[in-house]
Amino acid sequence: MRWPGRKHDISHGHIVDRGRVWCPACGRDVDIDRCYTCGAFEDLNREGDLEILHCQPVSRWAEVEGFPISR
């Protein structure tokens, strides 16, 4: 999910595109609904005409069975 002429990461977040977003924990695009139950999820907000998902930095993740939880 790349936006031509725009930065992929806006304000250290990830652009939501048609209900999908890049997941740093999975290393691929996932459905946005999965993010709400992820321990790394911080916030979802708007920047102009874009929805931006913010995750905790990887250094603050703890993993249980390969899935991030917050510390």
Image (cartoon, rainbow, N blue to C red):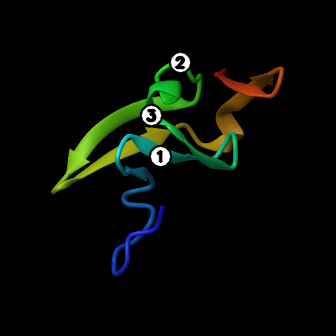
Q: What amino acid type should be assigned to the residue bearing mark 3? A: Ile
- Residue 36, compared with residue 27, is above or below; it is above
Q: How many marks?
A: 3
Check disc 3 and report the residue beneath it.
32
Spot occupied by residue 30 in the image (x, y as percentages of width and height): 55, 40
- Residue at 53%, 26% in the rendered image: 34
Spot occupied by residue 59 in the image (x, y as percentages of width and height): 70, 41
Check disc 1 and report the residue beneath it.
21
Q: Earlier in the sequence, mark 1 or mark 3?
A: 1
Would you call the spot at circle 2 few (<14 residues within 10 Å), some (14-19), or many (20 or more)? Answer: few
Check disc 2 and report the residue beneath it.
37
Query: Which numbered disc covers residue 66?
Result: none
Q: What amino acid type should be assigned to the residue bearing mark 1? A: Val
Camera-nearest residue between 19 and 48? 19
Q: What amino acid type should be assigned to the residue bearing mark 2? A: Thr
- Residue at 59%, 22% in the rendered image: 39
Say which quadrant the C terminus sits in: top right
